[in-house]
Image (spheres, rainbow, N blue to C red):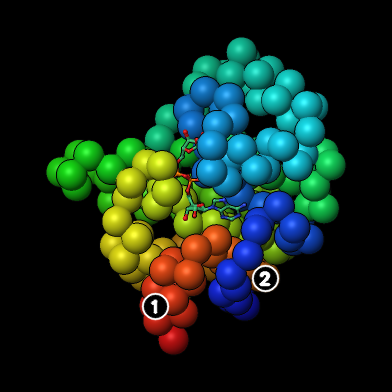
């Protein structure tokens, strides 16, 4: 599995799938979620609405798949990260589960390349260094998922995350 770390806007990525840092209602919002919904267009809101209508909200740590619509990617994997509440509420395990479920969904769908943002480290307030360490530890040794996924592109929006990831994967 090849891994790249770049700084940029994930809505420009051409990987098979990009990952969204969504909320449980898949309702769109600020941050990367807002950017993805704006770029993908109204049909994405509609598919998300139907998923929630059929299967209920997406719990923190889980992920669901939609089409990519006006984006360059074929799929969007919407993962719901934990809201940081001080660290004693299972936040680290929930964040790890997000990444596990992203990979599982990608493998199940036959997705070969994925662009992934820094889930939970914006509006949800997860400490960036801790998050980078969880991501690094997992993706350097994803164990059972040893992958049909060939390429992961970590797309960091802010410089702090970019430098933390560079250091983590050095
Ligand atoms: N491309 C890549 N990364 C981005 C982009 C972009 N265009 N824009 C922001 N980021 P956040 P969360 C980075 O707040 O913390 C939404 O309202 C950003 O710098 O987008 O998981 C949802 O609906 C940060 O490092 O997501 C939820 O309610 C990272 O993406 C809530 O925010 C995540 O920041 C989710 O909060």
- Image vertical order of residue 98 relative to residue 13, above or below: above
Q: Distance between the residues labelled 1 and 2?
A: 20 Å
Is 114 on the left-hand or right-hand side of 134? right
x and y percentages locating residue 62 in the rendered image: 47, 38
Q: Which mark is residue 150?
A: 2
- Image vertical order of residue 76 relative to residue 8, above or below: above
Which residue reaches farthest top?
53
Q: Which mark is residue 54?
A: none
Image quarter for residue 34? top right
Residue at image location 59% in from the left, 64% down from the top = 155
- Earlier in the chain: of badge 1 and badge 2, it is 2
Q: In which quarter of the image is the C terminus?
A: bottom left
For the residue labelled by badge 1, is the local secondary structure a helix, a strand or a loop? helix
Residue at image mark 1: 168
Q: Quadrant of the N terminus?
A: bottom right
Image quarter for residue 50? top right
For the residue labelled by badge 2, is the local secondary structure a helix, a strand or a loop? loop
Residue at image location 54% in from the left, 43% down from the top = 31
x and y percentages locating residue 160 in the rendered image: 42, 69
- The crowd level at tag 2 (other Cα within 10 Å; few <14, some 14-19, many 20+) is few
x and y percentages locating residue 109 in the rendered image: 70, 48
Confirm whether residue 112 shows in the render: yes
């Amino acid at each position: 599995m090849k891994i790249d770390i770049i700084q940029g806007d994930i809505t420009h990525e051409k990987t098979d799938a990009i990952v969204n840092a969504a909320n449980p209602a898949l309702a769109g919002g600020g941050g990367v979620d807002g950017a993805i919904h704006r770029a993908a267009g109204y049909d994405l809101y509609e598919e998300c609405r139907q998923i929630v209508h059929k299967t209920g909200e997406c719990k923190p740590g889980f992920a669901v798949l939609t089409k990519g619509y006006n984006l360059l990617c074929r799929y969007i994997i919407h993962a719901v990260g934990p809201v940081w509440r001080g660290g004693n509420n299972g936040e680290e395990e929930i964040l790890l589960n997000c990444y596990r479920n992203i990979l599982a969904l990608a493998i199940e769908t036959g997705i070969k390349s994925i662009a992934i943002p820094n889930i939970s480290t914006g509006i949800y307030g997860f400490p960036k260094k801790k998050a980078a360490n969880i991501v690094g530890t997992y993706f350097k040794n994803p164990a059972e998922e040893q992958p049909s996924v060939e390429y992961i592109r970590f797309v960091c929006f802010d410089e702090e995350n970019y430098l933390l990831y560079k250091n983590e994967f050095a």
